[in-house]
């Protein structure tokens, strides 16, 4: 270690000058150790709309499975293993609109746990392909019934042979929100040096918004935690839930929320496109909706001549929503 704090690799004798490495990358024993501790990025191009207010986004796409759902899937499966719910001969099954399924698939592959997923047949093609690449069995539900239809189908399958399955039910599993209570919230608190004034994110299973908000309110009672919901039942913000028209997740606790922003599909999509063009962040439409909500909050603060530190979540990358992936073993040259 030099006086400047750089790590110096002397290399082999006679092999040339030493290499100064300013930050040594992490070395881990498993891909699962890469889940969490995601970066926080400042959205400086958007801050021109809200002078005096800081706008930050948590890069959950940096998790190894590519989304915020890695946190919940890992906590759910590790807790189930500790309780003995996941044991030899038992297969995990759950409903998902995509990201949790990919996370279950990755964690299951790393832990040697077989996984079956029930998802609407109209989820994006990349999500279907990625889950299958991990060796996951996929069962499709009625696309017209959305995520609620996948929930009903998963329950029906489990009822037919309950001894075969472990059904975590991410919508009712406390491990879901606890992953964010113990992980996401403390990370945000540390990354902002305790200066966070507003937390804004969407409702899916509600684990992220409920777990993070619950802990942030304990750390700072003045921190305002705001949910984002689609403004219509027939919306196009995949991964987000319109609570009035949906099965309400049992872990959803409105008492920990200070407000709700109702988000049009078009606004979420437009902001997602703007993030790619202006910030270099190629993220999904739920992330666009989150940033749109955070920008509304930050803009209102600026108009009132108030300062703040507004934080939101970038849930996943946009490649899960666009052109189908191709994974071929043989090529014709």
Image (cartoon, grey):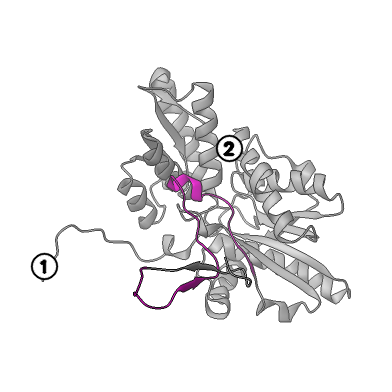
Residue 93 location in percent, x, y? 43, 32
Q: Does the magenta run of residues contain 33?
A: yes
* Quadrant into which the C terminus falls: bottom left
Question: Secondary structure beneath disc 1?
Answer: loop
For mark 2, what is the residue? Answer: 171
Mark 2 vs 1, N-terminal side: 2
Q: What element does badge 2 sit on?
A: loop
Residue found at x 45% / y 74%:
18
Q: 321 and 146: which one is in front?
A: 321
In this rendering, the answer to whether 304 lies above or below 326 is below
Write the residue at 67% across / 42% down: 182
* Residue 156 place in picture, x, y as percent: 44, 27
Picture disc at residue 332? 1
Q: Which residues are magenta?
A: 12-41
Main secondary structure type of the part rendered in magenta = loop
Relative side of 24 to 113, left or right: right
CB contact under 8 Å: marks 2 and 1: no
User: Where is 167 relative to 237, above or below?
Assistant: above
């Amino acid at each position: 270690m030099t006086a400047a704090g750089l790590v110096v690799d002397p290399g082999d004798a006679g092999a040339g000058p030493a290499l100064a490495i300013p930050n040594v990358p992490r070395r881990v024993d498993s891909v699962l150790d890469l889940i969490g501790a995601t970066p926080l990025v400042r959205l400086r191009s958007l801050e021109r709309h809200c002078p005096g207010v800081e706008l930050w986004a948590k890069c959950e796409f940096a998790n190894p499975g590519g989304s915020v759902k890695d946190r919940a899937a890992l906590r759910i499966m590790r807790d189930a293993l500790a309780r003995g719910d996941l044991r030899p001969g038992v297969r995990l099954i759950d409903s998902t609109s995509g990201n949790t399924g990919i996370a279950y698939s990755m964690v299951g592959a790393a832990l040697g746990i077989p996984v079956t997923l029930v998802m609407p047949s109209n989820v994006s093609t990349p999500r279907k392909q990625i889950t299958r690449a991990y060796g996951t069995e996929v069962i499709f539900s009625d696309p017209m019934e959305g995520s609620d239809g996948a929930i009903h189908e998963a329950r029906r399958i489990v009822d037919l042979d309950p001894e075969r399955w472990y059904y975590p039910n991410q919508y009712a599993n406390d491990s879901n929100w606890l992953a964010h209570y113990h992980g996401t919230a403390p990370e945000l608190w540390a990354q902002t040096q305790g200066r966070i004034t507003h937390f804004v994110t969407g409702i899916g299973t509600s684990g992220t918004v409920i777990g993070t908000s619950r802990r942030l309110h304990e750390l700072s009672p003045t921190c305002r935690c705001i949910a984002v919901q689609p403004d219509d039942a027939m919306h196009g913000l995949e991964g987000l839930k319109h609570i009035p028209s949906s099965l309400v997740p049992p872990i959803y606790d409105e008492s920990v929320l200070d407000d709700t922003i109702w988000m049009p599909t078009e606004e979420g999509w437009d902001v997602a496109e703007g993030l790619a063009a202006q910030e270099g962040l190629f993220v999904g439409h739920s992330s666009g909706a989150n940033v749109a909500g955070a920008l509304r909050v930050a803009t209102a603060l600026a108009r009132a001549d108030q300062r703040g530190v507004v934080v939101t979540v970038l849930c996943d990358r946009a490649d899960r929503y666009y052109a189908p992936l191709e994974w071929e073993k043989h090529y014709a040259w």
